[in-house]
Image (cartoon, grey):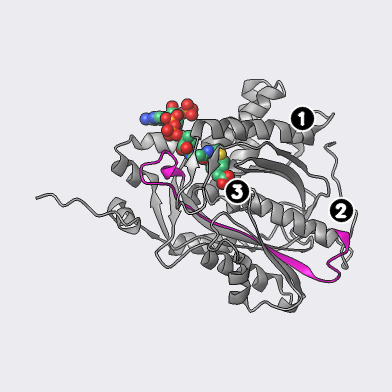
Amino acid sequence: MSSKPQTSSSPNRTGRPVGIASIGLHLPPLAMPVEELAKLRGQDPKKYTIGLGCREMALCPDDYGAVELAAEAAKRALARWGGDLSSIGLIAVGTESAVDMSRPLSAWVAEELGLSGAVRSYEVKHACYGGTLALRQAYEWKASGAAGEKAALVIATDVALYELGDPGEPTQGAGAVAMIVDDARIASMDPVSHPWSEPAFDFWRPVGESFPRVDGKFSLDCYKRAAEHCFAALAGDGDAEEMISELAAVCFHVPLPKMVKKAFLHVGERFGWDAERAEELFDLKVDPTMGWNRMCGNAYTASLWMSVAEALQGLAEGERLAAFSYGSGFGAEVQTFTAGPEAAAAAWAADVERDLASRRHVDAAGYERLRGVRLAVSA
Ligand code: HMG
């Protein structure tokens, strides 16, 4: 791709290109600093904070999960959109926290919202990439004209939990991001995106098992390889450094912030950038997009969209950003967005501020209770 802006070939009924018209976010009501987990696992807390770049893990109480997160995020996006529920013609939920093998999670959310009738409703699964696929499908549905006057409601929602003591445990998190695809008030989506997939067992969860199986080191290699291919396709014949420099932000799926840095520096190496310049670009374009991720942990499908929502805040109309999605298994895709007139005001930031201000922190003992671990009582 060239570094010049691409505009949608299919303008919406308002004459604006198709894209994100509203965003709603929701984080669960509990959280724990990773230092508390380090106490339980006998680790140096710096391993989690510096080695992995993690800060806090968002946690769900017993009666809270992917459905509650998704429904609340969707309500917030709908309230801000101002459109009528009867104008929604598609609801797609990207998740890997499915609550049923047949009934889509979208049905639970639609029930909660009172959404039924001439609506296409479904769930999309591809590990952390599921939300991106749902968004791309919604965009293509809308931009093709198949949607008519209707808009799409897309939600990425997940609760990420690992087996107790798993090396992935400090990266846990939970959250949901809902987006309404209609006219591009917040951001237009560029029609061309760049996917890359390779079948792999880097992270998977067999049917009936509660926690993922992970080949941690291999998953890091898969992620880096996917980033390399996607960004090479995005740069095309153009100058990659110039392309990145011209973007306002570069967002990544954030399983753990250190992974993102490793992948970005790997991409820089692939493009032959000077190491100091790669670090500088990371600090300028990537690191500032992970503030909310650090307060949330890995929310799987919602992770990238949390980063995109944070990066869109305050952008002037016409500024652009790139979003790299990765889902184990593995599938990846990079796409670009152009800020619309409502990006600058960033109304959705209030959702995160509100949830961060109201959530309760649990300590190591509280976490063990939450995870159903019987505490050893010393005599
Ligand atoms: P680990 O056992 O913590 O790895 O597992 P480690 O022992 O190599 O330590 C990590 C880093 O901490 C190292 O730094 C250590 O040196 C450093 P690095 O070599 O990487 O620069 N360290 C310290 N630093 C400061 N002070 C200390 C200290 N001690 C050690 N005292 C791993 C790490 C990521 C493998 C693990 O957390 C894991 O398995 N996570 C889950 C899998 C994952 O997130 N993979 C990422 C790519 S796959 C993906 O993104 C998809 C996913 O989101 C799922 C989906 O798609 O659905 C996961």
* Residue 142 percent location from the top left of the image: 82, 62
Please provide the residue range marked out in magenta. 144-171
Q: Is residue 68 above or below residue 222?
A: below
Which residue type carries mark 3? Cys
Residue 53 visible in the current orientation: no
Q: Residues within 10 Å of mark 3 (few under 14, many from 20)?
A: many
To which residue does mark 3 refer?
128
Q: Earlier in the sequence, mark 2 or mark 3?
A: 2
Secondary structure under the numbered disc 1 in the rendered image: helix
Which residue type carries mark 1? Ala
Front-lying residue, 260 or 95: 95
C-alpha separation, residue under disc 1 versus residue under disc 2: 23 Å
Q: Is residue 190 above or below residue 38?
A: below
Residue 203 visible in the current orientation: yes
* Residue 77 percent location from the top left of the image: 65, 67
To which residue does mark 2 refer?
8
Q: Residue furthest left?
A: 379
Q: Quadrant of the N terminus?
A: top right
Secondary structure under the numbered disc 2 in the rendered image: loop
Q: Earlier in the sequence, mark 1 or mark 2?
A: 2
Q: Residue at x 68, y 51 (%)?
A: 132
C-alpha separation, residue under disc 1 versus residue under disc 3: 26 Å
